[in-house]
Amino acid sequence: MKLRKLSRGDTIALVTPASPIPAEKLEFMTGLLHDAGYRTRLMPHAMDAEQYLAGPDACRAEDLQAAFDSDEIAAVLCTRGGYGCARLFPFLNIDRMARARKMLIGFSDVTTLHVALARRGVPAVHAPMAITLNYPREPWVYESFLRVLSDDLRVPDEAPKPETVVPGIAEGPIVGGCLSLLTDTLGTPEALDTTGRILIIEAVDDPSHRVDAMLTHLINAGAIESCAGLIIGEMTRADEKHFEDIGMRPWREIVTERLAPFGKPMVIDYPFGHAKNMLTVPLGVRARLDAGRGDVTYLEGLCE
Amino acid sequence: MPSALCSDGYLAGCDAQRAEDLQRAFDDPTLAAVLCVRGGYGAARLLPRLDLDAMAASGKLFMGYSDITALHFALNLRGLPTAHSPMVVSFEHDKVPWVAESFLSVLRGGGNLSERAPAGNVLVGGTARGVVAGGCLTLMTDSLGTPHAFDGSGKIVLIEDVGEEDYRVDGNLTHLLNSGALDGARGIVVGEMTGTNERKTERETVPWQQIVSERLGGLGIPIITNYPFGHVDNMLTLPLGIEATLDADAGTLTYTSPLAYLGSE
């Protein structure tokens, strides 16, 4: 399945499906999108805040569903992750969202929704959000982001290459995102399905033993055995977050020890997700991972 | 057991050694029961290495909690009752007398002396009867979608946790709900989300009692909170895999079948 093309002059909806964001943190992203020729529309509840959620589930879901349902909106950008997307399932019509074939742009907690769309064969965009771009990033971060929105899937040459863990070549659509959100789908009707796909994994603020526990969860659920290849990002701050009474191991050692024995082509430190500088990664389009060379290329476009 | 004092980062030695100790303890006819000295993290790594059917067939009493929850599920699933109990490290801190009394009574195949401990607080009133199952929330969700998954259908479900931020308590409860693991549950006994309300973050922490009430209060089954088990200062030993009656209005959990698994007792 291909997404509807996003053209200059089209409107991108800004939604806040999980945790709240202060208004001033939208400014950079809206400026970036306007400069690139897109219009934006702030959805009615996007600035709501109620403890760790951006308002009640019904309101956040209403915004998200309306953005997908409206003919005037061409793509949907999440302003922030945090926590809350998994609470929305009883309120959403995911099948109707899938049929809209719009880019759902975001990462972190938004992984939950990306996985649900992937189950329906719908591509999506793993990308920095409004909150992410409040900090200065390398020029290739913006270049990658704007290229993917315009369906130019070439990876900027300036982006650093990942390290090889297991050499080899894998081909398949990319699926995945933030580790804790991936495991939070397991055993549910909207569970991660990695069959024949290249799995991308990154995390933030999880202590090292939890990184191990969540990788073990993916292993015990069969998600590693069935994937075609593995692209590991960064387990941001895992090495600093350990609990003193439990102890730690460096996260790169854990990832290698747990995942390399499966023999899937695998790279580590691919720059995406919660890393300081991140690529925008198109999900659900056929990609080619050359793990020996550290290259990820796309074999088809995101849009029709 | 030979590798019980090994240490390697957050693990007590490699998976093969820990699994061998555990398997041997169940297999050895000179050993009558198996007590875990500590939780932490690592039990779920052992599952593919263990002969769980042989362990269950041994009929031995298996005791522990926290990370050990992962093993309780796998054994309960195979028909072996186990005991959610304090471990060696739990007794490093002073306890009120009924903690050891409850532990020793269950170890001897008797009742868990819950009448000596404080009652829980009613969240949703009513009574329910079912097989007791559950334990540490994070480990419950870590089992979902695996061959050793927690299934709350027909059960009185125990839930407690330690050190989790408020939104992770929400996330884990939401995971249980989204998976359907609480469909058909008869009642819920919440212990404490130890340390959650004391976590310091950039915003005001949402009390775990509020999250539990909001996420689980609408299920239409009896629920109590603050029942004394798990990571609290003083904890009862709670048999798993056998029937009990939850009287939510009274805040009590009363076992209705004997702890017959010690055979001779």
Image (spheres, helix red, strand yellow):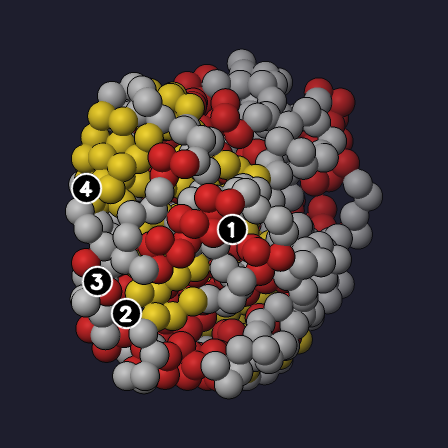
Q: Residue B103: percent from the left, percent from the top?
A: 41, 53
Residue B185 location in percent, x, y? Answer: 23, 37
Same chain? Circles 2 and 4:
yes
The three-letter amino acid code for the residue at tag 1 is Ser
**Residue, x 59% and y 78% (percent of image)?**
B5
Q: Answer few, some or many: residues within 10 Å of disc 1's Cα (few below 14, many 20 plus, some between 14 and 19).
A: many
Number of the label disc, if any, that sits on residue B63: none
Q: Which residue is mark 2?
A: B60
Q: Chain of mark 2?
A: B
Compared to A226, does B136 lie above or below? Answer: above
Q: State the SS at label 1.
A: helix
Q: Secondary structure at mark 4?
A: loop
Q: Residue at x 32, y 22 (%)?
A: B250
- Whether residue A104 appears in this view of the structure is no
Q: Earlier in the sequence, mark 2 or mark 4?
A: 2
Name the residue nearer the viewer: B99 or A25. B99
**x and y, in percent, of residue A280 in the image:** 61, 51
Q: Amino acid at mark 4?
A: Thr
Task: Identify the residue under disc 1.
Answer: A180
Between the residue at mark 2 and the residue at mark 3, the CA separation in whole angstroms equals 13 Å
Comparing A266 with A34, the one in front is: A266
Query: Decide: marks 1, 2 in contact (CB < 8 A)?
Result: no
Whole-Å distance between the Cαs marked 1 and 3? 45 Å
Distance CA(mark 2)–CA(mark 4) = 20 Å
